[in-house]
Amino acid sequence: MTTTALADTARAIVAAGKGVLAADETPRTLTQRLAARTIESTAETRRAYREMFFTTPGISEFIGGVILQDETIHQRSSTGTPLVGLLAQEGITPGIKVDNGARPLAGSPGERVTEGLDGLRDRLASYREMGARFAKWRAVILIGEGLPTAGCVNANAHALARYAALCQEEGLVPIVEPEVLMDGAHTIDRSEQVTGRVLQAVFDALFEQNVSLEGMLLKPNMVIAGQHCERQASVEEVATATLRTLSRHVPPAVPAIVFLSGGQDHLLATKHLGAINQVGGPKPWKLSYSYGRALQDEALEVWDGRSENVPAGQHAFYHRAKCDSAAALGRYRTEMESEAASA
Ligand code: 13P
């Protein structure tokens, strides 16, 4: 696949205010989310849960790509169609999480490095065969006393770049996800400092590994105070600090930045994205979303594991995606919450 074709795929995923649904929780993580609502987690309930999202009428207006997980990419819908085929029929690009998770970083207590490079070339080729056109790898960086260390930042940046280069070789658009966690009590200033340093290390590594920036998507955290920080920044402060940090460290050749929600409340995740697209400043990239929890939480609550609640769950998902898409276009207004919900 040529670099032009990769760039076309990357741009199509975020065309016209669209974003990405991150539906790639591992069975273990999804089991925890379902258990929190006393919903039984089996391969069948997990499939029913995913299918609710993928078959939401009209959702392709707002969702250009869905990140699947290994279990889901092998599953079929209740009518026997492979789930990946359901998405493709709707014009939604299927993607796949390919990292093997964040593991303790040897010699650096409290820090983690994401693993999964061994055998990755073959796994990418087989996922492409199954219909995936993009991939995701998530690195996590913790802010704390003396953390992150340069060793942790560089190890994760190197792995992200090796993964991204392999994806492009195998004809998949890499989503490069360095997540600075909002766990902890750090200030927004500290988040800005660490996020900037991490992004700089990631782009240095991508350059070194010959990754084509036009054929990738960046999935960063927003610059935000730690969840236990006494002073939470305003929506405008988050938007300004996030844009400033990105403009300092992300080359304009990257077609789009698709934020993760990272544990933010769904409404705040929408408002932050809306404000990022509304504040002044240079924006050479599209600024959109690749939310997991922030797109799914309301629908999960409404669904509650019951098939009779699927239409209501789909309504909730459609509403949230519509608001997030408006935010990506810089057109979000709080009044949309009630307008869209009653539509
Ligand atoms: P959240 O939006 O819930 O952070 O999930 C995005 C994601 O893909 C994390 O890897």
Image (cartoon, rainbow, N blue to C red):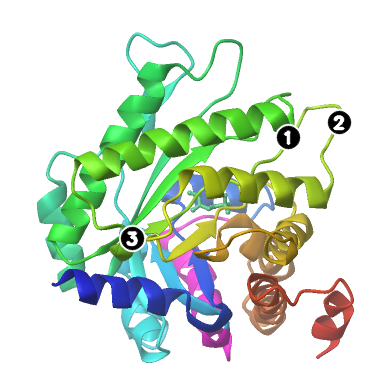
First in sequence: mark 1 or mark 2? 1
Give yes or no for residue 200 being in the magenta stretch. no
Give amino acid for label 1: Ala
Other residues around mark 2 within 10 Å, as few (<14) / some (14–19) / many (≥20): few
Mark 2 and ligand 1: say if the CB distance to the nearest ligand atom is below 8 Å. no
Q: Secondary structure at mark 1?
A: loop
| Side of 72 relative to 240 (left or right) | left
Please tell me which residue lies in front, 104 or 197: 197
Q: Is residue 332 above or below residue 243?
A: below
Which residue matches tag 3? Answer: 216
Q: Secondary structure at mark 2?
A: loop
Q: Specify the segment rendered in magenta.
A: 40-61
Q: Measuring 74% from the left and 46% from the top, which residue is drawn there?
A: 238
Which residue matches tag 1? Answer: 225
Residue 21 position, x and y percent, is 51, 67
Q: Quadrant of residue 327?
A: bottom right
Give amino acid for label 3: Met
Query: Is residue 35 visible in this depiction of the protein?
Result: no
Which residue matches tag 2? Answer: 231
Q: Is residue 75 above or below residue 254?
A: below
Please tell me which residue lies in front, 25 or 17: 17
Residue 254 position, x and y percent, is 39, 60
**C-alpha separation, residue under disc 1 versus residue under disc 2:** 8 Å
Q: Quadrant of residue 175?
A: bottom left
| Side of 99 relative to 313 (left or right) | left
- Secondary structure that dominates the magenta span: helix
Q: Measuring 54% from the left and 77% from the top, which residue is drawn there?
A: 18
Circles 2 and 3, Cβ within 8 Å, touching? The answer is: no
Q: Is residue 10 above or below residue 144?
A: below
First in sequence: mark 2 or mark 3? 3
Circles 1 and 2, Cβ within 8 Å, touching? The answer is: yes
